Image: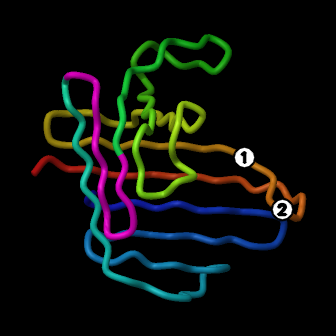
Amino acid sequence: MTSGEISFVDSDTLESFSFDGVKMKYRVNNYLVGESNFKEKVTINGKGTFGRSSDFFSNSGFWYFGNSNEELDIKNKETIILVIKESSNSSWKGLNNNQTFYIDRLTGKEMILKMEYTYYNSYGNKVEVSELWRYGKE
């Protein structure tokens, strides 16, 4: 991964992680709370499998392009779905943990993926999540 960011927003808190190619920085309400070295590698194979490893986790499984969805204004092959079959994080295993990314850019040298979703935390607060990940070819 060459860079990326993920943010979690609920009623009164903004938590974010940003990655600049070397360090992962963690912020709460835009104040730097911590940082650490971080690297992640993703391999997308033409046979429909993928592998992803980082300093904190590893997982693998299969992938496929998503179909069009008129209601969501998504065209055929504008999304990629990763189905995690094996993971060092036990909560990421199984068919119920598909990750669907919108393909923002896909070339022979670069892939930019985006994802947005909402969930409710243990306090019942609505949390909005936004992710953006940039990958370059080695």
Q: Is residue 89 above or below residue 16?
A: above
The N terminus: image quadrant: bottom left
Count of numbered circles in the view: 2
* Residue 54 horizontal/vertical position (percent): 31, 63
Q: Main secondary structure of the magenta part?
A: strand
Q: Is residue 89 above or below residue 84?
A: below
Corner quadrant of residue 37: bottom left
Q: Residues within 10 Å of mark 1 (few under 14, many from 20)?
A: few
Q: What label sits on residue 122 in the rendered view?
A: 2
Residue 8 relative to residue 37: left or right: right
Residue 17 in the magenta stretch? The answer is no
Residue lying at 60% horizontally and 44% vertically, measured from the top left: 116
Residue lying at 46% horizontally and 19% vertically, measured from the top left: 66
Q: Nearer the viewer, residue 125 or 13?
A: 125
Q: Nearer the viewer, residue 134 or 49?
A: 49
What is the secondary structure assignment of the residue under circle 2?
loop
Residue lying at 65% horizontally and 44% vertically, measured from the top left: 117
Corner quadrant of residue 38: bottom left
Badge 2 amino acid: Ser
Q: What label sits on residue 64 in the rendered view?
A: none
Badge 1 amino acid: Thr
Give the extent of the magenta segment. 47-59
* Residue 34 horizontal/vertical position (percent): 49, 88
Q: Is residue 16 above or below residue 63?
A: below
Residue 110 relative to residue 30: left or right: left
Q: What label sits on residue 118 in the rendered view?
A: 1
What is the secondary structure assignment of the residue under circle 1?
strand
